[in-house]
Image (cartoon, helix red, strand yellow):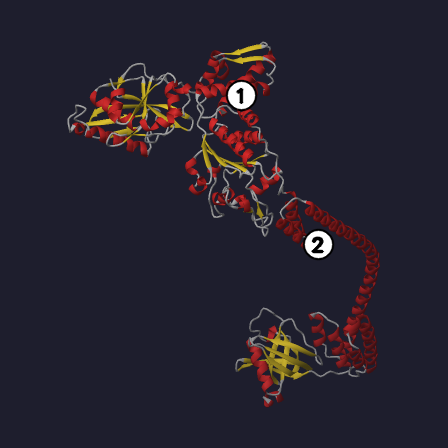
Amino acid sequence: MAEQASKGIFPLVYLKDIVILPHSVIPLLVERRESIVSVEAAYEKSGDFVVCLQKDSLAVRPDLEDLLRTGILATILELVRLPDGSLKVFIEGKSRVYIKDLIYESGHIHAVVELLEEVVVNQARTEALRRLVIEAFKEYAGLKGNTVDKKSVTEISLEEDPSRLADTVASYLGLKIAELKELLEETVPDERLEKVYEYISREIEILKLEGQIKEKIAERMGSSRKTLLGSQSRTAHSDTLDRSAFQDDISGLEERLKTKDMPEPAREKALEELRKLRMMPPMSAEATVVRNYVDWFITLPWNTMSPEEYDISEAERILNEDHYGLDKIKERILEHLAVKHLVGQLKGPILCFVGPPGVGKTSLGRSIARATGRKFVRVSLGGVRDEAEIKGHRRTYIGALPGKIIQGIKRAGTSNPVFLLDEVDKMSVDFRGDPSAALLEVLDPEQNHAFNDHYLDIDYDISKVMFITTANNMHAIPDPLKDRMEILRIEGYTGYDKLMIARHFIIPKQLSLNGLGDRHVSFTTKAINTIVHEYTREAGVRNLEREISSICRKIARGIVKGIDGQKVSISPTRVHSLLGVPKYRRPSREKKDMVGMVNGLAWTEAGGELLVVEATVLPGKGNLLLTGKLGEVMQESAQAAMSYVRSKAKEFGLERDFYEKIDIHIHIPEGAIPKDGPSAGITMATSIISALTKRTARSVVAMTGELTLSGRVLPIGGLKEKLLAAKEAGMEQVIIPVENEKDLAETPKGITRGLDIRMVEHMDEVISYALN
């Protein structure tokens, strides 16, 4: 290596975007593999190597044409090997060299160089430039402040070598690559000094301009600072006022809590939250959450109760004034008031009204509140699928609130309202929990004295609340929830009920709403019956009220136009002219007795209906055909009826294998309407026997009952509605199971009057009554 150095051959490192001048010490990060090998080779020997600028920064392995031919000979002062294999070296530039050629060997590049001599051409000019550069540097250092230390200024001031002076001063100026490249290639010292003086003079002008700009900005900022300080002072004053108002507000809340009639554990919890609130910034989000939480404690009616009415006669009058019929429910409410009057303290009953839509379940709850002197709150549970809707969200959630129970009690303003939970059978279950399970605590008299809402996180006594729930379908209510409630069924209204409700409740209400209250408008009984039977088909009275409202609006229009006078009487004919073509036909029986056609009775949510069963015998192979959109249970009833007939073939005068050469087709008209249930069993058996024996079925007889294979007749449901349907269809005799005798005792006399009701235990009795 020493021999190569004597020949001017040194390891070469070419740099991208870095120009190094002689007499300067800089750190250098070496990452390229070839450069690492060159530096290590130089470090192991003399420590000298050549550094030059790579003109084409994109060249991966540059050749001589891609390099700046003027470089520097540098020596390594310190070398540090980094963990990633790269090197960090501190180098010092020694002198300028000219690169004549490149030698590639041993995985790295060597440069063949010659030292560039620096000759002073004009001694006097060089000295003048030296002095100018030194003075300029002193001014530059003064403008730069602490960036250039005093030691450096002193050293440069004493520098006699013009070449070294030019290179050293240039290293302080932060020059661009092109400018450094010019200085590196300039070998005449006075020419280099002149360029340095030009560069430093430019830098001084820039620094002076920077100073002027800073002074102007400082003046503006001084004015703005005064304004800002004034604003900050006002803001601080405002913050002080806000803080003061915040503390006053907390003190007000504390006073209200201390005077509030509430349980001591709840008071202590709220006061503890207030102590936390005092330590919080007024405008923080947490302060708002705590403030709302304390507000709930203050506004809830912990021990506030509505004074209850104990006048049984007055309560009965109110219930009768608001609703027609519903005797069982009215009796239950009056019993509660009577016991409460005697006992003094009584837990609120938990009632569940189950019935079809439109029969007055919801309005009955409001009526009960009025009769008992309590506040009324209604919450609809239809579609609720989150347990937190009942028991509230924990305060960790953003926008957390108590559940619907606590919200309803706050809305009522008392802790003993009538609380109606509407549509309790229409709650859903999903991943957020089961709201019906959350209701178990609410509706349990043994637990609800300590109801724990997640938001309040403290027990609240809701045992004084009279909970009433409503449902259309009792089977959709979970058994544990059903077990906690007293089920009261509200059956569909009969035609007579609807007549009374229309005459005494709906018509007066609609006449008043449509501005006809002071007019002489009357509805005949036949007109009301026409609306009930030909324009509505429902268990309740919602559609009946809509149709009567429509008639009242049309009469109002006629009076305004002068078509109708002061007195208007609504007859069936007028009903048809106002409401148009009837929507439904009245159920009616066949006029004459026929083979295979038997009248059955069915129950629907809209009430009772006449269910005609037709059977016919066809040549075939023993098949039983069922049509009329029959449900699975009804199809099984038909098969059971057929099996019963086959087992009794001899008694009916049939051959034992009669079914092998025939098909029996059973059809129930109105085929678009789904039908299901076991109560048509005796009807289908009677129809089959009539078709096989050719005995006509009596058209004035209707029947209902479930049939077993042995011929026993089992009880059915919806007897009241079925008897009403039979009466409206003109039936004279109705066959029912003997086990339904208890239901017959609860059926209004107005329905059973005119009907010959026969109670049977076996199919033999049915045949004797139904077939000629």
Label 2 CA crowd tier, 10 Å (few <14, some 14–19, many 20+): some
Asked whether 597 or 373 is in front, the reply is 373
- Where disc 1 sits, the SS reads helix
Name the residue at 44% across, 20% down.
Answer: 495
List x then y, in percent, for residue 39. Answer: 59, 81
Left/right placement of residue 235 relative to residue 279 reads: right
Residue labelled with disc 2: 278
Left/right placement of residue 462 relative to residue 282 reads: left
Name the residue at 58% across, 38% down.
Answer: 416
Q: Residue furthest bottom?
A: 3
Q: Earlier in the sequence, mark 2 or mark 1?
A: 2
Q: CA distance from mark 2 to mark 1?
A: 58 Å
List x then y, in percent, for residue 512. Answer: 59, 19
Tag 2–tag 1 contact (CB < 8 Å) = no
List x then y, in percent, for residue 224. Answer: 82, 55
- Where disc 2 sits, the SS reads helix
List x then y, in percent, for residue 41. Answer: 57, 84
Disc on res. 505:
1
How many numbered markers are drawn? 2
Going by the numbered disc 1, the residue's amino acid type is Phe
Label 1 CA crowd tier, 10 Å (few <14, some 14–19, many 20+): some
- Against 561, residue 257 (above or below) is below
Picture quadrant of residue 700:
top left
Answer yes or no: is residue 14 visible.
yes
Going by the numbered disc 2, the residue's amino acid type is Arg
